[in-house]
Amino acid sequence: MTDKFNFLHPRSRYYGEFTPENMMFNANLQEFAHRVSLISGLETGGKLAPEEAYQEIKTLWKNLKKTKKQLGIGQNSTPGE
């Protein structure tokens, strides 16, 4: 069962600067990319309407932006300063 999950939901290793915030954002970014890929495949295969696919991806994007802001990723000051 674990092999099946890892096959369907692959995770890449994180090579960037280690902070808990960066790790959390990376996990969220990988989840975003995976879900966009699935939605794109469903739309391409005719299982999902283009507008519905667009709305799903737009919602995922808004959630990713919100997470980025909450974690303070990309701001000038680093956490702990």
Image (cartoon, rainbow, N blue to C red):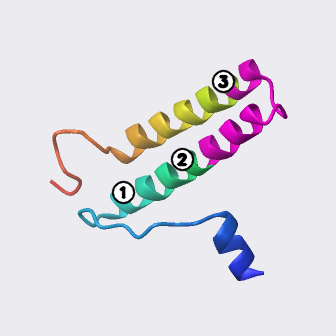
Q: Amino acid at mark 1?
A: Glu
Q: Position of residue 28 (x, y in %)?
A: 51, 52
Hey, which residue is sitting farthest front in the picture? Answer: 45
Dots 3, 1 in contact, CB < 8 A: no
* Circle number at residue 69: none
- 80 left or right of 35? left
* Circle number at residue 21: 1
Of the numbered discs 3 and 1, the one sitting upstream in the chain is 1
Q: Secondary structure at mark 1?
A: helix
Q: Which of these two is toward me, 10 or 56?
A: 10
Of the numbered discs 1 and 2, the one sitting upstream in the chain is 1
Q: Residue at x 68, y 46 (%)?
A: 38
Q: CA distance from mark 3 to mark 2?
A: 14 Å
Residue 9, quarter of the rendered image: bottom right
Q: Which residues are magenta?
A: 35-53
Q: Residue at x 31, y 45 (%)?
A: 73
Of the numbered discs 3 and 2, the one sitting upstream in the chain is 2
Residue 20, quarter of the rendered image: bottom left
The residue labelled by disc 3 is: 54
Q: Amino acid at mark 3?
A: Tyr
* Mark 3 vs mark 1: in front: 3
Q: Position of residue 33 (x, y in %)?
A: 54, 47
Crowd tier of the residue under label 3, counting other residues whose Cα lies within 10 Å: few below 14, some 14–19, many 20 or above: some
Q: CA distance from mark 3 to mark 1?
A: 28 Å
The residue labelled by disc 2 is: 33
